[in-house]
Image (cartoon, rainbow, N blue to C red):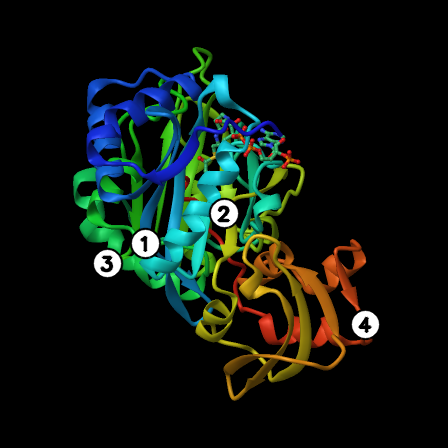
Amino acid sequence: MDRHPDLHFRELPETDIDRALALAYLVFHESPEDDRRKHHHEMLRESARIGAYDGDRLVGSLAALRFTLSVPGGELPCAGVTMVNVAPTHRRRGVLSGMVAELYRRCGTEGWPLAALWASEAVIYGRFGFGHGTRGQTIEIDSRTPLALRVSPDERPLRLVDPTEAPALLGPYYERTRELRAGRHARSEAWWREEWLVEKDEEDGDLSPPRIVALGDPLAGYAVYRTKSDGEGCGPVRVDELEADTPAVAAALWRYLASIDLTGTVRAWGRPMDDPLQHLAADRDQVRVTSVFPSLWLRLVDVPGALRARSWAADVDLVLDVTDTHLPANSGPHRLTVSGGHASWEPAAGPADLALDVRELASCYLGGTPVAELVRAGLVTEHTPGAAAALDAALRTEYAPHTVDEF
Ligand SMILES: CC(=O)SCCNC(=O)CCNC(=O)[C@H](O)C(C)(C)COP(=O)(O)OP(=O)(O)OC[C@H]1O[C@@H](n2cnc3c(N)ncnc32)[C@H](O)[C@@H]1OP(=O)(O)O
């Protein structure tokens, strides 16, 4: 890699935000409306910002949103890495690598044990120690015929909620779901308004504004969705979020979504890996999983801090030999001892029970990927038979980690 000698990485000052946005729009092939530009400007203003400069020319930038991410049994400060871009004239010369090194330094000063992102291409971030913290699946319902369900839907009335009222109504409910599902960041009211329920969808401008349907008072479940006409009465319903207290509430919401007039398919793109919908469906040909994908890429920047902060489902005593080429403080054999739900992580001299890269540890950390699966994939080495199963028993969570907040 031919790194330019004048390349350097530093805090991107507020006065360079417009330059950073111009570069980001160029790189992402976008030309947003003025209100989105203002929103992006404000978002960068509130973020930690890293610029890559060639002399005094800005040739790359990266922003870190100040997130609080749910982890099993708690939550942790987390860098929400976004708007990563490198000028097309400077690609593959180490600009991203330099910005990531600066990000990790910044995580230390900001007190972020975790960093997380959604990747534009799956091949980019593994080399920097990011693993699949959460995965999602797309589930499609053929709704040209009534949705056949094995569970009786909750028959309480459904109501449509004005998006302006959503943060107050849905916010506290969503916040409670963060205790169940790791990988969700706390949504501010501004996030609900300007990211989650933004009027015009950024990916598909032909979709309707967000619609919200709710059940129960107090709230027992809700769905956020958008629709589109196909001119033939068979348009899609895109489901962005569905949360429900009980299977009967979920059944009522899915039945509603599958029976909207002038639509013929329901596409729920970011469902949790343990979504009960497939079990609820009486006709499995009508409800199909069409894709599974990594959603939140997670980086354990401070491995001891991250391990000590989460809750554990079982005691365990193992030596883990972790490789972290970017952050050597995380590397080497360490004894993980979990007792009574609390973990300690101390350097160890003895032989390792398991050897793994820090990206694999990140994939397992929220409970979404079993260690045993990665042993079978040849990515984790099990020196002591049964060690992977013991670690999995300790890492286990009741619900799959999950998030739909793309950023
Ligand atoms: C969280 C987010 O914002 S995701 C959005 C990421 N941004 C984009 O996709 C916008 C368009 N792309 C870009 O701006 C750039 O190409 C980036 C950011 C993806 C990569 O930046 P670069 O400065 O070219 O990366 P850098 O030179 O540091 O590459 C580091 C390594 O990653 C590899 N790499 C980087 N990007 C890619 C890619 N898209 N595909 C395959 N390999 C890649 C490089 O080959 C290099 O490998 P090596 O260490 O074996 O030589």
- In x, y percent, where is residue 182? 46, 61
Q: Is mark 3 within 8 Å of ligand 1?
A: no
At label 1, counting other C-alpha atoms closer than 10 Å, the crowd grade (few under 14, some 14-19, many 20 or more) is few
Quadrant of ligand 1 in image:
top right
Nearer-N-terminus badge (3/1): 1
Residue at point 23% right, 58% down?
A: 217
Q: Nearer the viewer, mark 3 or mark 1?
A: 3
Q: Secondary structure at mark 1?
A: loop
Does 204 sit above or below residue 221?
above
Q: Amino acid at mark 2?
A: Leu
Give the quadrant of residue 369.
bottom right
**Quarter containing the N terminus:** top right
Q: What residue sits right under mark 3 in the picture?
A: 217
Mark 1 or mark 4, which has the lower sequence index?
1
Name the one closer to the observer, 321 or 252.
321
- Residue 57 seen from this side: yes
Label 4 close to label 2 by CB (< 8 Å): no
Left-right relation of 280 to 112: right
Q: Position of residue 237 (x, y in %)?
A: 43, 30
| Pointer 2 residue | 296
Number of the front mark, 4 or 3: 4
Which secondary structure lies at badge 4? loop
Q: Amino acid at mark 1?
A: Arg
Query: Which residue is the site of mark 4?
Result: 383
Foreground pick, 30 / 225: 30
Q: CA distance from mark 2 to mark 1?
A: 35 Å
Q: Position of residue 300 (x, y in %)?
A: 51, 59
Query: Disc 4 to disc 2, how far (Cα)?
Result: 30 Å
Q: Which mark is residue 156?
A: 1
Of labels 4 and 2, earlier in sequence is: 2
Residue 355 in the image: above or below residue 122:
below
Question: Label 4 to label 3, Cα distance in Å?
Answer: 54 Å
